[in-house]
Image: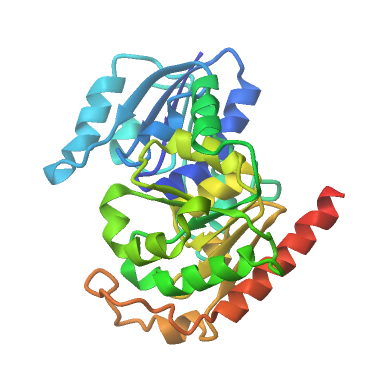
Amino acid sequence: MRILFITATRVGDAVLSTGLLDYLVQKHPDARFTIACGPAAASLFEAVPNLERLIVLDKMPMSLHWVRMWAMCVGRYWSKIVDLRNAPLSYLLPSFDQSHLGRRDNSVHRIRYLARVLGLENNPPQPKIWIGDGHRKRAETMIPDGSPVLAIGPTANWAVKTWSADSFAELAKRIAAPDGLLPDCRIALFGRDDERPQVLNLIEAIPEERRLDFVRHGDLLDVYACMERCTLYVGNDSGLMHIAAASGIPTLGLFGPTLEDLYAPWGEHCAAVRTPEAYTEIYPKEFDHRQATDSLMDSLSVDHVEEALRALWQKAGRKAA
């Protein structure tokens, strides 16, 4: 049995789709999987059980990347195709059964929207990321046993949805204070190498003896393995936030010009906090986020985020007890 799973370009959307993939892996344990996704998310799927092929959809002019994918897949008969991108050419692939994502629905969380493709909207499967022993061993070296770890994701793919580095620094200082939520904890910072200039002030504000600087480590499975060793996560609406939530640690997402109703971190130990302004106020219809360089998150106070973190920690502690 062969299954073709076509998923997202962006890391966050790809993570949210992994619950469906896990459902298929569990339902068809002997199936061989081919996964097609964008380059940014590709490494998330390297350790999927029974992975036969990983097709990286590098964007090409005139949507020729879809033609390339079709050419790589047309020579096989597929037992099942699950297409979360609604690629027109996937309909032309020989298969016994196909499931395609319907019209976009902004009335439900993205997890439920994706689960609808397999009729699982009312009981959507949790995101699942597979890693190997090598990733966990590297994570043990990167985050050795010791004091608790506050993980921070201070970057995002849009400048408008990034909380300021100074605010993150103040929050970290409070959480790690002797009377803080995690006294004397270590602070782990995550992000891509090209995002480093945006958060240099934050990196330098964390005392070296408690700083774990991973704002340049690009292997997503290593990042996930590190998240598993962290105690608590706070960060902007981003792929890192969804990776943290998938790892099972308490995760707080910060929102302003994006909707937490659609993209809040998913899981029983997750929560979201947003700016005082409503989404419609902070993000008017005529606003172009691609041209904006300033944050729209400045009205979100450190007090508000600290309060939300404490509430999440208390809630997570009650459920774990």
The quarter of the picture where residue 8 lies is top left
Q: Is residue 302 visible?
A: yes
Viewer-proximal residue among 146 and 257: 146
> Which color scheme is applied?
rainbow
Near-viewer residue (287 or 94): 287
| Outermost left residue | 61
Query: Residue 178: x percent and y percent?
Result: 69, 66
**Lateral position of residue 168 relative to residue 304, left or right:** left
Query: Does 158 sit above or below residue 6?
Result: below
Residue 227 rendering spot, x and y as whole percentages: 56, 43
In this rendering, the answer to whether 29 lies above or below 42 is: above
* Residue drawn at the location 51% of the way across and 31% of the way down: 141
| Above or below, comparing residue 168 to residue 187 in the picture | below
What is the residue that sits farthest to the right in this orientation? 321
Residue 244 location, x and y as percent?
56, 48
Q: Is residue 107 visible?
A: no
Residue at the image point whose x is 55% and y is 85% from the top = 276
